[in-house]
Image (spheres, grey):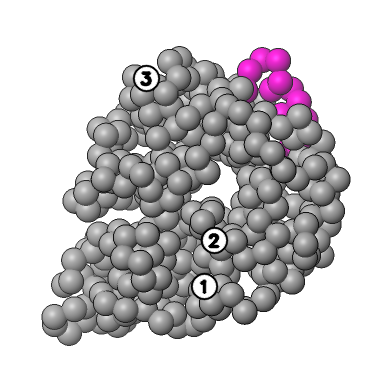
Amino acid sequence: MFRISRYMQSLLNPQRAPAQPPVAPGGPVVIWNLIRRCNLACKHCYSTSADIDFAGELSTEEVFRTMDELKAFGVPVLILSGGEPLMRPDIFEISHRAKAMGFYVGLSSNGTLIDQYNIGRIADVGYDYVGVSLDGLGRTHDTFRRVPGSFARSVNALNLCREHGIKVGMRFTLTQHNAHDLEGLLDLMDELQVDKFYLSHLNYAGRGNRNRREDAHHALTRWAMDLLFERCLADIQAGRPREYVTGNNDADGVYLLLWVRRHFPQHEEKLVRMLRRWGGNSSGVNIANIDNLGNVHPDTFWWHHSVGNVRERPFGQIWQDRSDPIMDGLKTRPRPLKGRCGACAYRDICGGNTRVRALRLTGDLWAEDPGCYLDDHEIGLGEPARAGGA
């Protein structure tokens, strides 16, 4: 996850920059797909969910035991996801327990099941953040979600969360077929006074893997990033405390550096230092995923590869075990990157970007990431470049 607002605030308005989050004692952020069932069938779903029951999901007792293990291992954050997590009957019991244990707790929902009947229970949990997915405006969203009226219900969820004092954000996956609605969604963010906007680059996993031909062209990606940078800058200058975040393409950090180099060159060196501390892709290191069956994955787009199951071993043992060659490679610094990624002058910032995308399209985990939208000149190939932005 790349926090555009945090970096821009630190550079341009440091007195109002958010405090850095506490360093975890050793545990990663855990995105937990508690249930695979979903009332929608989105085109880009990485878990390939459907509105059916999936056998073998973790029981409440198993979830609680795993939560104890996660806490003992130093996991600071739980993002409760699905499927649609609100379809799990014990979701509020799980959520209350997670909050009581001191986790930062987020809820990742499609929003269609958030209504006037359950918003009170959602507010009572005290979620640190609720993310509602939108794939465009009106018809665009309903087409992606394959359920008429889902856009209106999701917007209603955003309004209800705001009315009940819940920090809420929009989650948007960029493709060629919905990019035309990005500006409108950012305008809607203003209108509804939404706290956060998360842009996810399409990753090649689950249903998203089958639709990778619909991924945004690199030029479109650059346009979208420029738009987010401009909106973020305008909010900072206006004193609006909003967050802009991206995910699934760690080239975003390098692209921000290039943008700052053009617009605010006096801040370049400070940003380089910050981006090096970030380090780019953290799959298998600072990001983990547990699926509905208890399988542990390097992140949410690695469902085809499990490194263990919490029913068989404690999470901490699984996460520290480097006998799995993929986990060993992901934890290796520097990673054994090839091609453009291996030769890139900014690999200490990007970390090699999304390895699962390289694997899906080339069969080689360490090949160059085909999702990198920077050209050879920008990453220092073919002529001298300032390594790491220095």
Q: Which one is in front, 333 or 313? A: 313
Answer yes or no: is residue 389 visible: no
Three-letter amino acid code of the residue under disc 2: His
Does residue 78 sit above or below 343 in this rendering? Answer: above
Look at the numbered discs 3 and 2 and tell me whether their residues touch, using CB distance below 8 Å. Answer: no
- Residue 386 horizontal/vertical position (percent): 25, 82
User: Is 326 on the left-hand or right-hand side of 336?
Assistant: right
- Marks 2/1 in contact by CB < 8 Å: the verdict is yes
- Going from the N terminus, do you reach mark 3 or mark 2 first? 3
- Report if residue 118 is visible in the image: yes
| Residue 128, position as x, y percentages in the image | 67, 43
Q: CA distance from mark 1 to mark 3?
A: 41 Å
Q: Which residue is mark 3?
A: 138
Magenta span:
114-127
Which amino acid type is shown beneath numbered disc 3? Gly
Please give the name of the residue rendered at 51% of the width and 81% of the height, measured from the top-left corner: 332
Q: Decide which of 49, 347 is in the foreground and name it.
A: 49
Residue marked by disc 2: 305
> Mark 1: which amino acid?
Ile
Q: Residue at x 70, y 69 (%)?
A: 318
Q: Is residue 241 magenta?
A: no
At 79% across and 48% down in the image, what residue appears?
63
Between discs 1 and 3, the one toward the N terminus: 3
The dot on residue 326 is 1
Sequence order check: which comes first, mark 2 or mark 1?
Answer: 2
Residue at image x 36%, y 24%?
143
Callout 3: SS:
loop
| Secondary structure of the residue carrying numbered label 2 | loop
Q: Residue 376 sits in which quadrant?
A: bottom left
**Residue 189 lies in what quarter of the image?**
top left
